[in-house]
Amino acid sequence: MITRTSPRVRNLYLPIFAGLFTIVITQVFMTTPAQATCEYQGQIYETGETVGPYVCMPDGSWQPQ
């Protein structure tokens, strides 16, 4: 048994799916990368901050400059 949807019903679904698609695509392209924090001797540092010869990296690790 084949169930068919009428063109009228399909025309109702098109704007809904187009709106959902637009929302999903917007979320994918508008998100910002996560900023990790680094900890050094009990202090919290943001990505890019330096302590001595080390720089806080986006993955939360310390790397030499």
Image (cartoon, helix red, strand yellow):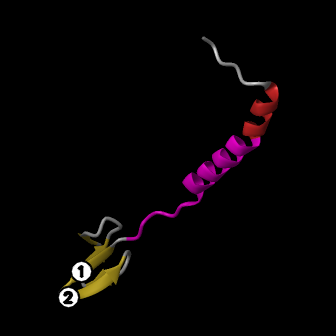
Q: Are marks 1 and 2 in contact (CB under 8 Å)?
A: yes
32 inside magenta stretch:
yes
Percent x, y for residue 57? 32, 69
Q: Main secondary structure of the magenta part?
A: helix
Q: Quadrant of residue 15?
A: top right
Percent x, y for residue 64? 25, 71
Q: Quadrant of residue 44?
A: bottom left
Q: Quadrant of residue 62?
A: bottom left
Who's the residue at 28% across and 77% down the image? 38
Q: Amino acid at mark 1?
A: Glu
Q: Quadrant of the N terminus?
A: top right
Residue at the left extreme of this rendering: 41
Q: Quadrant of the C terminus?
A: bottom left
Q: What are the residue bounds of the magenta stretch?
A: 15-35
Residue that carries the numbered disc 2 in the rendered image: 42
Percent x, y for residue 47? 37, 75
Above or below, 59 relative to 17:
below
Please rate how many residues cluster around mark 2, counting C-alpha atoms within 10 Å: few if below 14, some from 14 to 19, many from 20: few
Q: Nearer the viewer, residue 4 or 30?
A: 4
Please rate how many residues cluster around mark 1, counting C-alpha atoms within 10 Å: few if below 14, some from 14 to 19, many from 20: few
* Marker count (numbered): 2
Percent x, y for residue 21? 64, 45
Report, in whole angstroms, how far the alpha carbon at label 1 lies from the one at label 2. 6 Å
Q: Amino acid at mark 2?
A: Gly
Give SS at disc 1.
Answer: strand
62 inside magenta stretch:
no
Give SS at disc 2.
Answer: loop
Q: Nearer the viewer, residue 1 or 44?
A: 1
Who's the residue at 71% across and 44% down the image? 16
Residue that carries the numbered disc 1 in the rendered image: 39
Above or below, 6 relative to 64:
above
